Image: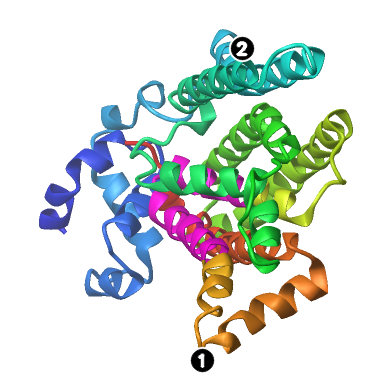
Amino acid sequence: MKSLLHDHRDLCERAVDPLEIAAGLEAHGLTDRTAARYRHRDVFALAEELYARMPPRAHDPAAGGPPGPDTDARAAWTLLALLPGAACLATAGVLRVTEGVLGDGTRALVTVVGALLACLALRACLARGPLRAPEGAGRAGMYACWLLSYSVYGEELLAQVMTGGPDGPWDGSPAPLLGLAAVIAPAAWCAHLFTVRAHRKLSGSRALEEFGAGVRPLLLAAVSLFLAALLPLLYVADLGLGGGGVTVAAVALGVLFFVARLLAVHGLPEPGTVALAAACAVEAAAPALVLAARLPGLEPLARPVDALVSAGGTGAVSALACGGAALGLLLHAALALSRASAHTRP
């Protein structure tokens, strides 16, 4: 026991309750079987003894626990979260007002400047507040760029490829991009509420199983709340830009981004990166298979894509890719975020 206390002394000194120690032990790979070697029934019982062995001054509540409400900080990151949507909305407004007035080159320049401003705003938004990932997001940004580009141009590209092309410029559909940019602020608040509620569960639970059972409904509530904000924003964006209606693909992409970022915020960026990469692979495979099927003897390669497009249109490819990835990632998040170790701060 002394060696265990020595190995995890920093954790025990920093903890404000036994459950926080149990979460840290779990994060370091200790299991109930390990606890049994120290004559304890589970990790939580072992954590209680470690907590009791620490000097009383080490458990000063003022030194740990969730921070109190900070109105100024919340206002700051809320403002930052609104900037990407504002940049996209301003760009769309300028392009709409100047339609038929500015030349193609000038309109392209306006689009590039607007996209650059939106990217800078998004970078600032993800650098602080409830959407900040302490360990970064790895290559998720690269995959996200592909998925966003496909949401704008992918359906038209696939349609041209399936009819013998590509043989001309692709007509973009910017409505999903505008809707997804606008939902960043609600996403930040959903992530904030989930984190705060999860920390309260962590403080009030008496066992890791109790915490896990309580945090899963919080995750589903956060995703549902995000969906409740995403759907009307996508609808309004589509209505304003004269699109063809809210697509399943855009909704699935929004959920995929949200769950991936939520995992990254809690120190688990790898699953989200894998899910984003899988969605990219499916979207890239569709036109690639159709093109490959033009070679002699390879005609069967295009049959899965033909069947999918015949059943649901060209948007079905993106809906399947993002929807499948989002569902799989959500199931993983329900397990990963139900572990107390995902909610402890260094």
- 9 to the left or right of 245: left
- 100 to the left or right of 201: right
Q: Label 2 sits on what residue type? A: Ala
Nearest the eye: 262 or 305 = 305
Q: Which mark is residue 297?
A: 1
Helix or strand or loop: what does disc 2 sit on? helix
State the residue at coordinates (71%, 77%): 306
State the residue at coordinates (58%, 68%): 286
- 108 to the left or right of 144: right
**Any magenta on residue 185?**
no
Q: Which mark is residue 75?
A: 2
Could you tell me which quadrant the C terminus lies in?
top left
| Residue 339: x %, y % from top left | 47, 57
Q: Is residue 84 above or below residue 292?
A: above
Q: Could you say which quadrant of the image residue 222 lies in?
A: top right
Part of the protein shown in magenta: 256-284
**Any magenta on residue 283?**
yes
